[in-house]
Amino acid sequence: MILVTGATGNIGSALLKELHARGVGPLRGLTRDAARAVFPQGVEAVEGDVADPASMKPALEGVRSLFLVSRLGSDADILEAARQAGVEHVVLVSSITVQTHPHLGPADENLAVEQLLKETDMAWTILRPTQFASNALMWAASIRGRETVRAPYAETALPTIHPADIASVARVALTEPGHHGRTYALTGPEPITARQQVEAIAAVLGREVPFAEISRRQAHAQMVAVFGVEAADAVLDVTGGDVNPGLLMVRDTVSQVTGTPARPFRQWASENADAFR
């Protein structure tokens, strides 16, 4: 039995589809509302919330492998519940900022979760992805409203990753030998700037999408209301204010692990065009 937490999210939903398509099973998806969850036929929907580890105990019964995204709940309690349930292997989604921006609060928190996992007696695989292509959804309302997209650091190019590529690496780690005790830094196939991302979205929509660069101060004021001060500072540092060369580096880990090239941003934009229409 494999349990996928965040089963309705960008990574978890793609992971369940991949596992199911390859005949892997039994599969179980954790969701806060099993009645509304839409999973592939045969995938068991189990209610639970990573923010409430006690609610996960029924979902963990009989589970051999666990897919977990860090920092969505009390990771120490989740990992302990998994250990007590007899889980043998955990695939953890952390962040590449653990190695590129270790001084930032969120990166330090991710590193702490990695250490917690390594200190258990469960086998582990750690995934450290860079910026998600799906972060572009923050512009969806503006684009749908035919307004100008405003973003800082317009010319900073990061190798943004398609969430489905994270899922593909997770699928291999969960089902094939040779991945226990491994840490994988994951990126997309090429660097792409915020301006180029908006241009890619405009291309799949077949219309112009205006773009304007704003200052860090302007962006910070907008983001604090959503993320809080520390998270806003961290995001702005990572995306342009404190760029570490390691964050800009394209890695071929996705193709090395899965045998398939990483998906470009434009593919993500094409697959998610309806969100911007």
Image (cartoon, rainbow, N blue to C red):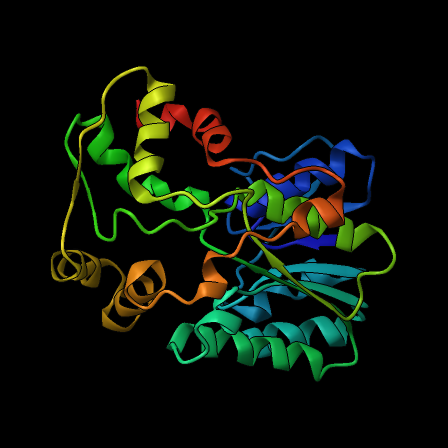
Asked if residue 125 is positioned above or below residue 142 in the image, the reply reads: below
- Identified at 66% across, 38% down, the residue is 261
Query: Quadrant location of the C terminus?
Result: top left
Residue 131 locus on image (x, y percent):
45, 53
Residue 211 locus on image (x, y percent):
19, 35
In the current view of this chain or complex, which residue is farthest to the bottom? Answer: 119
Residue placed most toward the observer, 115 or 50: 115
Q: Can residue 34 be seen in this view?
A: no
Q: With 235 as the anchor, is 183 left or right in this view?
A: right
Residue placed most toward the observer, 154 or 233: 154
Asked if residue 110 is positioned above or below residue 23 in the image, the reply reads: below
**Residue 126, picture quadrant:** bottom right
Q: With 274 as the anchor, is 247 left or right in this view?
A: right
Residue 133 locus on image (x, y percent):
44, 43
Residue 77 locus on image (x, y percent):
59, 77
Q: With 38 as the anchor, is 179 left or right in this view?
A: right
- Identified at 76% across, 41% down, the residue is 259
In the current view of this chain or complex, which residue is farthest to the right? Answer: 177
Question: How many numbered dots are placed on residues in this image?
Answer: 0
- Identified at 33% across, 19% down, the residue is 205
Q: Can residue 271 be seen in this view?
A: yes
Residue placed most toward the observer, 18 or 52: 18
**Residue 137, picture quadrant:** top left
